[in-house]
Image: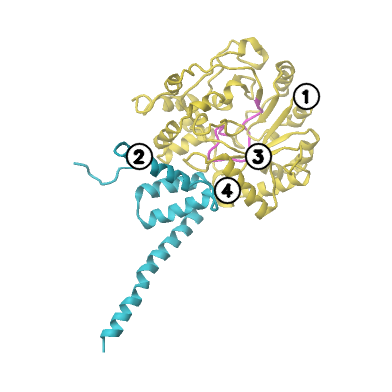
Amino acid sequence: MQKTYYDPADLKKFGKISEWNEELGAKFFEYYGKVFEEGALSAREKSLIALAVAHTIQCPYCIDAYTGDGLQRGITKEEMMEALHVAAAIRGGASLVHGVQMMNKVNKLDM
Amino acid sequence: MIKSLHKRESELANSKRQLEILSNGIFQSGDLPKFAEKISETGQFPLKAKKLEILQVNVGYMCNQVCSHCHVDAGPDRKEIMTRETMQQILKVIEKTGAHTLDLTGGAPEMNPNFRWFVEEASKVGVKDFIVRSNLTIIRANKKHHDLPEFFKQHNIHVVSSMPHWTKGKTDKQRGDGVFDKSIQALQQLNAVGYGMPGSSLKLDLVYNPSGAFLPGDQASMEKDFKKALLEDFGIQFHNLFAITNLPISRFLDYLIASENYEDYMYALVEAYNPAAVANVMCTNTLSVSWDGYLYDCDFNQMLQLPVNSKAKHISDYQTELLEGRTIAISQHCYGCTAGAGSSCQGSVT
């Protein structure tokens, strides 16, 4: 039986998802490649966004990929950590802002 | 300051030990193909030398810095220095080779006591591109070197200097404490005499080596980021950025092994193998001369003591017909020059 759910080697097999549905797989990877091209945002900025999102969705493949990508692009560890705090702030804030809903309910029901 | 592998009497100071490591383990077990097997897949084995275009001369392993990734294992404790006699032999060869580029490297080439004499004499030969690989801090290290920018200008030297990042933290981590500040001062001095300015014929290029166990990113993007940051933060300008892959030899190999990154790094190099880069690897148009006058296919082979496959082993034996068409000596470190966009002393090759 497999001992872990994730294997780092699987990241390199990402492209194989096209084998079971070539049309959708090809469309996805074409889209993916286009998204990360230089545009109104630089490829460097997009890499930092990807790193922050990777931590938000807690995808170990993406964290591995975009930490390495960031190093290759000369992104510093300070920049990486700041990007993560933005993700953490939004994620934490998303929980906390629901506190308003809780407060509304309590205020309505409580005497 | 860390000490060289030689001073530490590390087993990796022995080039034979390095070659053993590069041939054993994952390459012996067949987990990864040897470089010869890989280039055979595309019919590019054996690699053959073409017409000589670049003569790269290592005038000595002495350096004022001890960079953590240095493939030369250079440092203040290295005493191997080229003599004037060997330089005279090289001057005779430059005249008859027709090589368009002369490339002086080290260590810190400026620390060779005959450096200025050699530059003065070699500049009379009239090569098209005369490169000095300056580590920048040497310009600030001692008063006697403060006028190097003017000296370079006087002889129309093309200055190529290492700069691993535009921030102090990453630079000093790779090249030593205080290196970043001194490098910035030296670059400002070079700019002040005209080096690196837009449209200037005084060429100033920077070399980027990754500061860790990863491959360099896209050279053009890195150049854009370097130019923006150095101009905004320090008012510094330069012409081109060469992104160079760290080859798994000497101190970088020592780092890879000590940090348990060696196998992953070799996998990354092999996965990034680009057959298009093989056609343009620098060893096919370059000859590397060591401090004691021996000939190698490249500076990396020099450090691994892999001599040229030719009867002409020494600069004093130089004969074009004995060296042109020779079979290039290869090992697994060569994957460093064929990864991604390829890597050479002039940066990407594709």
Residues behind callouts 2 and 3 on a single chain:
no
- Mark 2 surroundings: few (<14), some (14-19) or many (≥20) residues within 10 A: few
* Residue located beneath label 3 in the image: B240
* Residue located beneath label 2 in the image: A23
**Secondary element at image label 4:** helix
Q: Amino acid at mark 4?
A: Asp
Residues behind callouts 3 and 4 on a single chain:
yes
Q: Nearer the viewer, mark 2 or mark 4?
A: 2
Q: CA distance from mark 1 to mark 3?
A: 23 Å
Q: CA distance from mark 4 to mark 1?
A: 37 Å
Using the rendered view, name the quadrant where residue A84 is placed: bottom left
Q: Nearer the viewer, mark 2 or mark 3?
A: 2
Please tell me which of labels 3 and 4 falls first in the chain: 4
**Residue that extends furthest to the left in the rendered view of this protein:** A1
**Secondary element at image label 1:** loop
Q: Position of residue B74 (x, y in %)?
A: 59, 34
**Secondary element at image label 2:** helix
Q: Is residue A54 visible?
A: yes
Q: Which chain is cyan?
A: A
> What kind of secondary structure does the magenta stretch mostly adopt?
loop
With B41 as the anchor, is B189 left or right in this view? right
Q: Nearer the viewer, mark 2 or mark 1?
A: 2
Q: State which region is magenta.
A: B56-73
Which residue does the image show at 38% across and 58% down from the upper left? A56
* Residue located beneath label 1 in the image: B126
Labels in figure, total: 4
* Residue located beneath label 4 in the image: B172
